[in-house]
Each structure stands twice: as structure tokens, then as C-alpha cells.
Amino acid sequence: MRLENKIAVVTGASSGIGIEFSKKLAAKGALVYGLARRLNKLQEIQNEIGSTFIPVEMDITKYVDIQEWVNKTFSDNHLPHILINNAGLGYFGNVENLSVDDWNTMINTNLNGVFYLTREIVPLMKKNEDHCHIINIASVAGLLGNPQISGYNATKFGLRGFSEALFKELRYNAIKVSTMFPGSIATHFFDNAEGSDTHANMLQPSDVADTLIHLLETPDNFLINEITLRPLNPKDPEDL
């Protein structure tokens, strides 16, 4: 796909890899709708990127709000080409200490929010004469379980299953579906994890975004439906 003049939707666009995805898409000439709850942060990003980044204040767990925004924004003359389901969060702890509220928040954001937006965007992509692409940002936690992240594991395993089914469902509609499974990325994601700090040997957001751009720019009949990203040496340099 040539990204120039393509229309992209990026969730979780106000922080971490969402910012990098938006920057690199805009640099390639795409029009980017950046969705997040923090409008002030989105506006700061727009000031940096320019008018090709459009801030959208949105809580993706609110289906009616998503539905209204999609109906207001898109039409037969303005159809999306790219959907990056990036928004996600994790709460950590032994299962008996994981609150019901935290469990529900992860399910609502990491799974329900992906479904809500995808459900509304797919019919528009089917109308698009160009090839389209959905990329879901999972985690290596969607490939293997580990203690104290059982809830997060459940959502990312679920996202993998949803993505694989969606890929098989949409492939004959000229819609690609890819899932990225990154390891630890140097973002604020680990702020909620006791004893976990970012360091230089984690994956860098810009590198992860470069990989996303590569997936999007593959030839139309070439699909990488799953890709795992890991640091070669994941240890904190201070511990070496």
C-alpha cells in the first residue's frame, strides 16, 4: 500500500507507540485520525505533526460514541484505509488481588474497544476500492502466560483469536488483518507494575512504528498476518 493520501484511524494515539504510529503515518502523507481520551495531549501532538493529524477525543469503551463519530466522519467519498487498534492497558498482581474493576477495565479496553471500532470500520473498508489494512497491537503476553498478568494475558490471547478469525473473514474483501506481538517497549505502560522500570534495552517506540509502516507498505497480495517483536538482549544495561 502506498500511504500517501490514505486515511488512517489510530487508537491510543496520545502516548507511547500510538504517538509514533501517528507521526510516521503522517510523514508518509496519510491523514491520521488520532483517538484517545486526553484531548489536550492530542492537541499537543497536532501542534507537532500538523494538520494531517486530527485529534479525536474518544473513550473506545463507549460504543455509542464510536458509532456516532464514525457516522459523522466517514462517507462514500471519505472512506478509511487503515485501522490501528493500539489502545490497551494492563493491571498486574496475583489473581486473588486483581480487582473485578481492573479485570473489567482490561476487558473493556483491550477487547471490547477493539470490537466496537472494528465493527463500525469494516463495512466502510468493504466499500473502499483500494486495499485496506487493520493492524491489532497485541503483546507477547498474547502468546504465553506468566504469573501476575493473568487478566492481561486473557485479553491479549483473546485479541489474537479475534484477529486470526478476522483475517480469514476479510481476506477476500481486499482487507488485510495483521497482529503485532511486541515484547517490552520503553513507554509508560509499566508505570502500574511494581518494580518494573523502562530501560535502554527495551524495544523503542520508533522502531516498533517502523515495523508497522513496513507491514502497511507490503504489496497488496502479500500479508504478514502475525509478527513478534523482541529485544535481542532484554536485560537492563545497569544489570550487565
Image (spheres, rainbow, N blue to C red):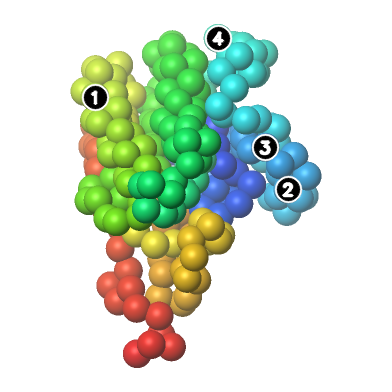
Query: Which comes sooner in the sequence, label 2 or label 1?
Result: 2
Label 3 CA crowd tier, 10 Å (few <14, some 14–19, many 20+) = some
Residue at mark 2 to residue at mark 1: CA–CA distance: 34 Å
For the point 30% across and 63% down, the residue is: 230
- State whether residue 83 is above or below residue 214: above
Q: Marks 4 and 1, how far apart in space?
A: 27 Å
Which residue bears the numbered disc 3? Answer: 37
Residue type pointed to by label 4:
Asp
Tag 4 near tag 1, CB within 8 Å: no
Where 212 sits versus 74, above or below? Answer: below
Mark 2 Cα-neighbour bin, 10 Å: few <14, some 14–19, many ≥20: some
Residue 165's disc number:
1
Tag nearer the camera, 3 or 1: 3
Structural distance between the alpha carbons of marks 2 and 3: 9 Å
Cα separation, mark 4 vs mark 2, equals 30 Å
Mark toward the start of the polypeptide (3 vs 1): 3
Camera-nearest label, 2 or 3: 3
Mark in front: 4 vs 2: 2
Percent across and percent down for residue 206 are 49, 61
Name the image quarter holding the N terminus. top left
Element type at mark 1? helix
Residue under circle 2?
A: 41
Label 2 is placed on what type of residue?
Lys
Q: Mark 4 sits on what residue?
A: 76
